[in-house]
Amino acid sequence: MDWNKDEIEYMREGLVSKEAITDIHCCNLSSSETEILRYLEVVYRDGSRKFVYQNQEGFQEFENNWYQNRFTSFHEFLTTEEEAVEERGVLSLKYYKRRGPESYVEMDLQEAREELQGVREFPARITEFGKYDGKVNYHLD
């Protein structure tokens, strides 16, 4: 990929994971993190973003889960801004604008890191699978 590093503000790693509970030897429960998707978020000075990922299966699982939660969930990997709110009595259903395919780059993450060497890196963004933000929040603090 041809990155124009002069136009990049920063990058950060993202991780979507879920906790898996397993039953070991009939009576002992064990907990472990299961990685769904790891990606690099590249943020440009003009506010646009590119997301680099290498796991198409994880991308699909994350996207399918997000669609199931679409009325109340935002995640910068999949959406941009809040587009509309539908009021159904006491229930507010939120709709978010979906990112287009031009926002995604499928490539080896190590290769992308090497190509982006020297770009300022922010702390990682860790998301729990199925529990997404209820409002637009890019977690820049």
Image (cartoon, grey):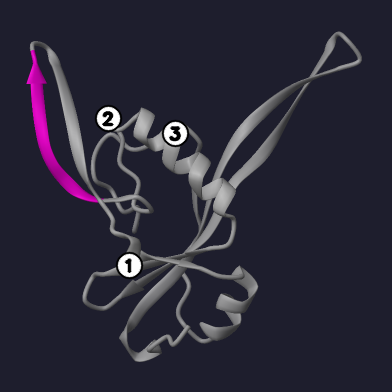
* Contact? badges 3 and 2 (CB < 8 Å): no
- CA distance separating discs 3 and 1: 21 Å
Q: Compared with residue 74, is residue 56 higher up or lower down, i.e. above or below? A: below
Q: Amino acid at mark 2?
A: Thr
Q: Earlier in the sequence, mark 3 or mark 1?
A: 3
Instruction: Tell me if mark 1 has few (under 14), some (14-19) or many (20+) residues whose alpha carbon lies within 10 angstroms of its own.
Output: few
Q: Earlier in the sequence, mark 3 or mark 2?
A: 3
Q: Secondary structure at mark 1?
A: helix
Secondary structure mostly taken by the magenta-highlighted segment of the chain: strand
Which residues are drawn in magenta?
80-88
Q: Earlier in the sequence, mark 1 or mark 2?
A: 2
**Residue position marked by numbered label 3 in the rendering:** 65
Query: Which of the numbered marks, if any, corresponds to residue 18?
Result: none
**Residue position marked by numbered label 1 in the rendering:** 102
- Badge nearest the viewer, 3 or 2: 3
Tell me, yes or no, whether the highlighted magenta stretch contains residue 69. Answer: no
